[in-house]
Amino acid sequence: MTAQVERWGVHEIRLEGPSEGNPFTDVELVATFQHRNRDVVVDGFYDGDGRYLVRFSPDQEGRWTYRTSSSVRELDGVRGELVVGPPGPGNHGPVRVAGTSHFRHADGTRHESFGTTCYHWTHTGDEEHEERTLQALAGSPFNKVRMCLLPTQNMRPPRLAFVGTEPGRLDKTRFDVTFFAHLERRIRDLQELQIEADLILFHPYDKGHWGVDDMSAEEDRFYLRYVVARLAAFRNVWWSISNEFDFNKAKTMADWDALLQHLQRIDPYRRLASIHNGTAMYVHASLYDFAKPWTTHQSIQHWDATLTAQWRAAHPKPVVIDEIGYEGDIDRRWGNLSGRDLTRRFWHTVTGGGFMGHGECYVDSTPAWISAGGQLVGESPARIAFLRQLVAEGPADWVAAREDGYRLDYFGERRYAHHDLELGEDEHLVDVIDTWEMTVTTLPGTYRGRCRIPLEPRPDLAVRVRRAA
């Protein structure tokens, strides 16, 4: 029977095979999918109880055939075909880089990244809490979630990516398939909400406790192969090879380069991939060299959003400030921004041509949103939603559009009585935007040539200019 699947959906092949020994290491399984004269080779993986899976996400409509190759007889030479139809409602395909500074879905739909951080929201073991997180995300402006696969030193999650429960004694040759099945369910939930899952594959926060931040190069590659085989077919997956990579003293820059290159080699879909730096006391940031071709975009931690245009100019890749400090009131230097401060940083980033991520960590919210999700209580999400709507109303490249009569100028904490512009000969409409009160006031008449835009001398204003015609 010919399988039916939508474009950019997931087709899953289920096979029965050996369960004795260690199938994670002993059994090799790949499938080659063919469409016309094009082959796509996809790794299969062991899913426990003698069950083997191959997941494939087709990017072209029409007839595809496949054939498996395996080191064991039962899994070798399995043939089949599938017919790929048009994508269903809400399926715009994976997000890709568009030009030098922006993102688009595969079908051409715009994607402006407004992310948030919930590092371990899928590790709590509390289904109701996870459902509350999804409900909060559904009502939020956020379309990307940064989330970890591996535990930190202080965590005691009910399940881990590797088999085992005792610190320092995990079996890194076997994966907990129940852990991954749960993670996949949550990735699908995010996909239903049209939210990207930015998966953080490594981090420095274990400090040798579980033994997952100082694995050998062979163990790292073994882990990556399994993760990519299981998760890469989901169209809303992004890869972050590490959070704060420079804080991990077990790995060198050459190690991170090798891991990113390996990730790109084994991912048949070349999902978006980057690496995230740390900062030293918010006075020094060791950004990765994004000129290296195995990163698709710049994932940056920094405290100064006004540098966005500088980073755009340095490398022809989109800038995403994934961490800039969090709205909250905790005693850590990064966790006590006011909602107004975080909103200002979003505006500086976006008007500089980049994208930014949100985070929240209030003392009264336990666990903190950035740690495990839950409820959003801060003041910035509503203002971020307002900004996202304004961006959606404008041109796809609002920075380049300055040459074609569109401007979005932001003044932050500065208080000006007026804003001088040179608009050329065409007539323009001018809006004064209060970014905190979330109001748009269109000034009477039109403006052209050298003109002075009157402002009330108060902070958090922006001016939007649009060609009247």
Image: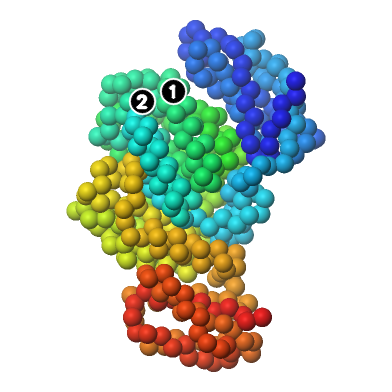
Residue pushed farthest left?
A: 331
- Residues at marks 2 and 1 touching, judged by CB atoms closer than 8 Å: yes
Query: Along the horizontal axis of the image, is 161 left or right of 3?
Result: left
Query: Along the horizontal axis of the image, is 452 left or right of 52?
Result: left
Query: Along the horizontal axis of the image, is 405 left or right of 420?
Result: right
- Give the SS element for disc 2: loop
Residue pushed farthest top?
A: 20
Name the quarter where the C terminus is drawn. Answer: bottom right
Q: Which residue is mark 1?
A: 178
Residue 224 vs residue 417, the one in the foreground = 417
Model colouring: rainbow
Location of residue 404 in the rendering, given as x and y in whole percent from the top left corner: 63, 77
In percent of the image, x 66 and y 42: which residue is there?
88
Do we see residue 377 in this rendering? yes
Residue 169 vs residue 357, the one in the foreground = 357
In percent of the image, x 49 and y 62: which residue is there?
388
- Give the SS element for disc 1: helix
Residue 282 vs residue 63, the one in the foreground = 63
Q: Residues within 10 Å of mark 2 (few under 14, many from 20)?
A: some
Query: Disc 2 marks which amino acid?
Result: Arg
Location of residue 369 in the rendering, given as x and y in whole percent from the top left corner: 32, 46
Q: Which residue is mark 2?
A: 159
The mark that comes first in sequence, 2 or 1, is 2
**Separation of marks 2 and 1 at Cα, in angstroms:** 8 Å
